[in-house]
Image: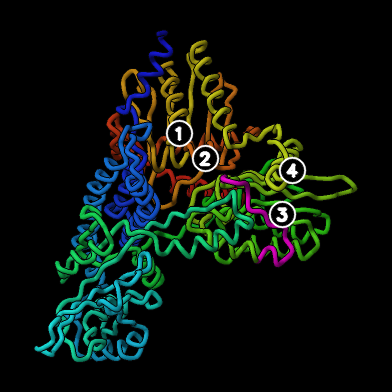
Amino acid sequence: MNTLNKNAIELQSPLYYNNRELSWLAFNERVLEEALDERNPLLERLKFLSIFSSNLDEFFMVRVAGLKDQVKAGFNKPENKAGMTPKQQLNQIAIDTHRLIDIQYNTYNKVLIPMLNEENIEIIQMSDVTPSQYSVLEEYFNEQIFPVLTPMAVDAYRPFPMLLNKSLNLAIVIEDNDEFEENRFKTAIVQVPAVLQRFVELETGNDKTQFILLEDVISHFIYKLFKGYKVVSVSVFRITRNADMTIHEEGARDLLKEIEKELKKRKWGAAVRLEIQKKGFDSNILRYLTDELEIHQKDVYEIDGPIDLTILFGFYKQLSKSREDLVFETLIPQPPRDISSDEDIFEKVSEQDVFLHHPYESFEPVVEFIADAADDPDVLAIKQTLYRVSGDSPIIDALKRAAENGKQVTVLVELKARFDEENNVQWAKELEKAGCHVIYGMTYLKTHSKITLVVRRKNNRIERFVHLGTGNYNDQTAKIYTDMGILTSKRKFGIDATNFFNYLSGYTEKPEFHHLSVAPFDIRKDFIRLIDEEINFQKRFGNGRIIAKMNSLTDKLLITKFYEASNAGVKIDLIVRGTCCLRPGIKGVSENIKVRSIVGRFLEHSRIYFFHHNGEEKTFLSSADLMTRNMEKRVEILFPIFDGDIKMRLNAILSIALEDNVKAREQDENGIYHYVVRKQNESIVDSQLHLFSKAYQVMEDEE
């Protein structure tokens, strides 16, 4: 056996990899740490608790549900990186999640609620309300809540109801007042109406702001639904169900109708988690629920507080307008450095590539690019991919207007964008109604690319303008996600964009692109080539260097290639916000690799890939993370940056991320993350705030 093969076999050891699911939980723990971080304002800390809960819901609905399906199907092989079977993964997920839930509610009850009280904001119980508040609440129950409630009896004639995914419910045990009734104890289920606010605000007559939870009000007055019976117990619970969709693409005559059909099923999948409120729950009800739902004891979470802290999103919105002192200071996205508001966007892009960096720079030029194209009489065609868009999207409006103005408009709407399927079905219908040509992508692949092509005829010449980005065409998330893009009129980018859209909409082999690298498969192939080149430069000149910023890193082929580069002496910095299956700092495996994660006010979403290339410096932006799904099961784009000034700006952004000593955590050789320790006399660097201050500085300098 030669040395190369021996090394390749050694790099397969499960000791050198983090399990994907457990690594994701470690990321969500970093989100939870933001709720503990005293540097964050109080309401922002509550919002991070909410984000943690929202993330966990999706994790259970998809990832945990998938593992449970594997166990049910009798699949017991270890996964190919950390070597854990589905059962082992589920057991460890349960252990880790119970620990994290304990931290979450300890933070809520013992840290943040007392801090709210100090700010004269109280969440009270029914036992704390004043007589006048009690009267108001009783009237509110009678007039507003009671008519919406539906008690569902459970008996031989009325079986246990099929409860909606993520709905909050009350299980009520009642006793028949007739002492001669043989079966005196009965059970009923009442769903807490999602149409009503969970936080009911109370009049106080003083400077305090008080709220009470809707389920507490319903629980207190629930006896009014059961006349002739005595309420014995009220248990508050919530079910999380398997929400993964099985789409039979090959046999589907109409993918849109197939997805609409599957969306109806999603709400009723198998139960994967049961949350029950500790306060006042009935142990008999708990046993009953676990039996009915066929759920394992380890998937039961006894909650010490309100179930489903995603409700803190709404609480944050209710209070943030009146209590600006308890939220982050408003940071206003600045006009992009490369284009001013009074410049014609097509003329500017004809002269030079324009770089955009959100949310530090405004997303408005992207909206204007589409809107101006819609209204420009010289524009002949607009082609665009849409993965996730906002609820009231100005980009959708512009595309519809373009079609109404007689332009050729082709829009690829990705119907399979997880948890945005319903929105995207609706957008697809609206766009078609307006006269756009709507396509849904390719069989068994998700189109995750972010690209727009505008074709214009000027002075009898065809011009092509292209936008390429790392993030979605969503004007709302562009305010809170860090993303990048370029606008270019370079001829070969225009040809590539034309061929890309023809590839998606027609029948043709994958084109040979000038500049674009397109997944499936080509991006991984190009990364392996680039890493191999860096290894060769390291061997010849000793200056191998790679910096890669992404959301997740799970692809084993690329991880082993990074290990190979590390063993050759290439210095590698990986900035991975979320899941990372690579373990850095292991002697003889990854000792030249560092992994850091930045979790802060904005969601790090940009993907930047830098290769030193013996001083030639190759820099790429991409829609793709280095995950197997991005390499094999999605249509993704990796694109090079040629403009020297933009390359310098990207290098500076990477340098700032590597200097962050406030929101950055580094992974150790055991896969554990720790806050970066600031050295003595070292300046404080919060990379996100630093980039905002630089954007402000540029504007001030220009003014």
Residues at circles 1 and 2 in contact by the CB criterion of under 8 Å: yes
The CA span between labels 1 and 2 is 9 Å
The CA span between labels 2 and 3 is 24 Å
Label 4 SS: helix
Indicate which disc, 2 or 4, sits on the residue closer to the N terminus.
4
The CA span between labels 3 and 1 is 33 Å
User: Which residue is located at x 56 percent, y 23 percent?
Assistant: 529
Q: Which residue is mark 4?
A: 498
Closest to the observer: 65 or 558? 65
25 relative position to 700: left or right? left
Q: Which residue is mark 2?
A: 630
Question: Which numbered circle lies on residue 410?
Answer: 3
Label 3 SS: strand
Which residue ends up furthest to the top in the rendered image? 2
Indicate which disc, 3 or 1, sits on the residue closer to the N terminus.
3
Indicate which disc, 3 or 4, sits on the residue closer to the N terminus.
3
Determine which quarter of the picture holds residue 587.
top left
- Callout 3 amino acid: Thr
The CA span between labels 3 and 4 is 12 Å
Q: Position of residue 416 (x, y in %)?
A: 54, 53
Q: Which residue is mark 1?
A: 555
Indicate which disc, 1 or 2, sits on the residue closer to the N terminus.
1
Of badges 1 and 4, the one in the foreground is 1
Closest to the observer: 17 or 390? 17
Q: Position of residue 674 (x, y in %)?
A: 28, 38
639 relative position to 632: left or right? right
